[in-house]
Image (cartoon, rainbow, N blue to C red):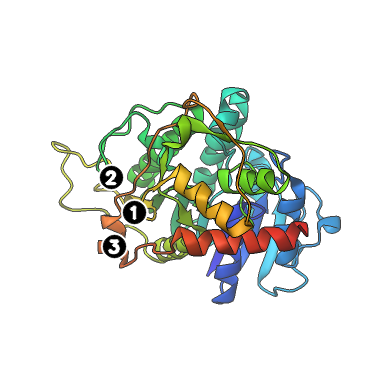
Amino acid sequence: MKILVTGTAGFIGSHLAKRLLERGDEVVGLDNINDYYDLRVKYGRLERAGIESSSIEYGKLLSSATESNYRFVKLNLEDREALHALFEQEKFDKVCNLAAQAGVRYSLTNPYAYIDSNIVGFINILEGCRHFGVKHLAYASSSSVYGLNESMPFSTSDNVDHPISLYAASKKSNELMAHTYSHLYKIPTTGLRFFTVYGPWGRPDMALFLFTKAILEDRAIDVFNHGEMLRDFTYVDDIVEGVVRVIDNPPMGDPNWSGKHPNPGSSKAPYKIYNIGNNSPVRLMDFITEIEKNLGKVAKKNMLPLQMGDVPATYADVSDLVENLHYKPNTSIEEGIARFVKWYREFFRV
């Protein structure tokens, strides 16, 4: 298959592109390589796949030096004309949209970045799929859409109408927009609610990266909600396995779906939502203890209250994933953190 993967300078996108290439797919990667976090990590991910950073030009498709089936283009999703031209030229079989302005806390101070990338950019993706015969659109949603929901574990059949950050609201909007296109134009779409992804090549704005860096530099770490946060930490390889299975299994629509008792996670249209999480929430303090163990160093801690826009707990119900795709993430935090710390020390030479 020829697959467009957006966000391939990003954490999950870079891992997904590598996995698809390994199994023989043709991949076109797209990313705007913004400076939201350390560009060394973004360019490092691209160079790992044979994309030379010195050769990248906006709007120009660049062939990988090491992967014969991989090309990359630097592009903004909100660049409607350029994205339309890319879809018209390449005639993708499937699309996996992982590009987005990420981060809950950043949305408190930079709201327009989320509208541009996550709303305007997503409608441009949908229009490309509509006009150029894409057979399946898989896209990243987020566990943050559950917002004020306190029913645990979070289920895709739950109502998610109470987001508490603009980032979450933008992801909920993506799900609504996708359903509209699935209904009107019969485009199969699948939304993926990721739960706290971590692992090698991870995002520098995420807890594992921040904690590891601070501990090694002998700086205090900020521990929100006094360490009583619960997170369904999910290892990146588990996430990628789930995404690949989703890409390969476009939704057909549920003939038993009822508008009298509507299930928000499915539809009569070819539309589906999945949680991808470890289904085993971990206390933040236990997570920190595991990092300390791998670094051989105890962290200095600033104990702080819950931050605005954050939820105290996440916990994924993955029964749909198990039932429909016969898959459940299972990497332990002990194994995952050890792999991350090994990568971190090698990449930053510390």
Left-right relation of 116 to 286: right
Q: In this view, which residue lies farthest toward the right?
A: 54
Q: Which mark is residue 322?
A: 3
Residue 103 position, x and y percent, is: 56, 36
* Mark 1–mark 2 distance (CA, rounded to whole Å): 8 Å
Q: Earlier in the sequence, mark 1 or mark 2?
A: 2
Q: Quick check: 248 above or below 312? A: below
Could you classify mark 1 by the number of other residues whose Cα lies within 10 Å: few (under 14), some (14-19), or many (20 or more)?
many
> Which residue is identified by label 2?
153
> Which residue is identified by label 1?
279
Circle 1: residue type: Asn
Residue at x 72% of width, y 65% of height: 48
Tell me whether circle 1 and circle 2 mark residues in contact (CB < 8 Å).
yes
Secondary element at image label 3: helix
Could you classify mark 3 by the number of other residues whose Cα lies within 10 Å: few (under 14), some (14-19), or many (20 or more)?
few
Residue 89 can be seen, yes or no: no
Pick the residue in front: 337 or 127: 337
Residue 340 position, x and y percent, is: 60, 59
Q: Which of marks 1 and 3 is nearer the N terminus?
A: 1
